Amino acid sequence: MSPLDLIRLALARLRSSRLRAALTMLGVIIGVGSVVALVAVGQGATKGITAQLEGLGTNLLTVNPGSSTSFGTRGAAGSATTLTIDDATALAAIPGVAAVAPELTTQKLVIAGKENTTTSIVGTSAQYGTVHNQTIWQGSFLTQPVTDLGLRVAVLGATTASDLGLGADAVGTDISIGGIPFRVIGILQSKGGSGPLNQDDQIIVPLEAVKSNFVSGDSVRSIGVSVATADQMDLVKAEITTGLKSRHGLGAADAADFTVFDQAQLLTTVNSITGLLTVLLAGIASISLIVGGIGIMNIMLVSVRERTREIGIRKAIGAKSRDILFQFLIEALVLSVLGGFIGILVGLGATAAIGAIAGWGFVFSPATLVVALLFSLAVGVIFGVWPARQAARLDPIAALRYE
Amino acid sequence: MTAPLITLDRISRVYQTGRFEVRALDGLDLTVERGEFLAIVGPSGSGKSTLMNIVGCLDRPTAGRYVLDGTAVEELDDDGLADVRSRSIGFVFQSYNLLPRTSALDNVAMALAYQGVGHKERIARATASLERLGLGDRVDHEPTELSGGQQQRVAIARALVTEPALILADEPTGNLDTASGDDVMGILRELHATGRTIVLITHDADVAARADRQVHVRDGRLVA
């Protein structure tokens, strides 16, 4: 019999016992469906986190001061006041550095009309927007002349603006930050994100304005450095380290009094963690695929037993063992592949639903579907071959006499 | 004169059941010419069924030579036997042995499928074969929708559709009432009249009497 004949035969067989076929396929449907859905969830989560991290700035290096030691007690990292505005200026001269944004952050009560909120006030340079991938929604961002003069102007994050009840027409109006009037010159585009990654809840002002009004001294909280291209990251990181060490009077062998934090490193770490989680989820899901395969094997064994006489008739009439083997194997394959197809559809449905709820949209890779289909094919072969061999090995005389 | 269709030469078949040896066939000789209508008669336990299995290439003899249509059957492996069954033998069984939940047409066409005949030709030849047996209006019926006599006609249509050298009928009337049984024997006689070789296996002397020649099996041998 040709493969087409056998597939036709298998389909006719499944049609004649629809409920049994459907229940048998259910195991594979659930298995494949959950593999597809969970892999997509993993990929969606990865994409979501990656997008948030990239939102912090592409090719971003962050220089933080080290910890301070007073009376023998080591303070928290970042507590030292070793980074200065001059350090930031010096970093800008390193080749490969695209933009530098020193940051001096403080928390202040902000009042606009009747509304108020307490949020981060980030004193920085005009390049902050470039370094942190910020785009302006209304008005304009800080400019070089404005930051040089240290004017009391403010660019509001999207969340802060809405907390203060400010819309597009707020540009040009005055708000009070820590009791001091600032002129709103722009509102940022929302970037999404939440928690510590939320960049929408902040007010960006010139560094000089923070220094002259809120925080005295010459030090900064951190310096954001944007590197021109990704492959220069390591080089620039090394240059920053040696450059700052020598500026701080430290030898090459001394421990640095600052840390250089690599955005890409975090991205790699996060990606490997989410990748691991994806594999873990897929692994758990594939257990149900195996269970589904055992279901197919079980039903095929029952089927061989029930159809012993049919096998005898077929053999008497001229079927070779191979014909019987393929007949039952293809029946198992049709079950598993059909189940795989339906499982993929179910999985994609679940993916779309989860994506919509979680907010990362519909993420799936065609590779997953191919793999899922190959898996269900493999399940059919692995769990179908034994019952099929049982059928093929039946002795025609005994099978014909079987009641 | 052409070579005989069937030559059985000192055929033995010994079954090993536990510590006992059962000698179902014991050096049996039989020759069937082409175009013959032969009845093999014997009571149960005579070795008749074993003989039918060997003639039908469902089983191999323990010793002896069996040549069917020029092929030395005892040398063939399982696939070889399946090939001979498919090409040279048309079976008609006592219990019809049609596939359940399968139309008469598909039951008949199935025999051609194992010869590698294409789908279209299978349908055409199976339809023709059923029509020849007066079942042209029953092609879509499943076995449960047919009477015993009709089911046996479908089985005969299936046996004929491959144009085999030998029709091997094992108690073809055993499950049928007298009228249907007569009907089936009539069909076999007609087939014989068109030149088919038919070997009939039965315990029923009346049925055997419809054949041209009878041989009797007792204790694994032919008796006169």
Image: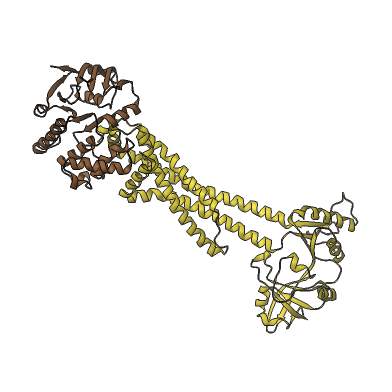
Chain colours: A yellow, B brown
What x and y, as percent, mark residue B28?
A: 21, 17
Q: Residue at x 33, y 38 (%)?
A: A304
Residue B64: % across, % down: 27, 16
Rendering coords of residue B76 (x, y %): 33, 23
Q: Nearer the viewer, residue A358 or A346?
A: A346
User: Given the current orientation, which residue lies at the most extreme right position?
Assistant: A249
* A225 left or right of B120 in image: right
Can I make out residue B91 in this image? yes
Is A115 situated above or below A21? below
Side of B30 where A295 appears, left or right: right
- In which quarter of the view is residue A167 placed? bottom right
Q: Is residue A174 placed above or below A128 in the rendered structure?
A: below
**Considering depth in this image, is A232 or A256 the residue closer to the camera?**
A232
Image quadrant assignment for residue A175? bottom right
Q: At which x and y percent is residue A391?
A: 35, 35
Q: Is residue B163 above or below residue B212?
A: below
Residue B91, by quadrant, is top left
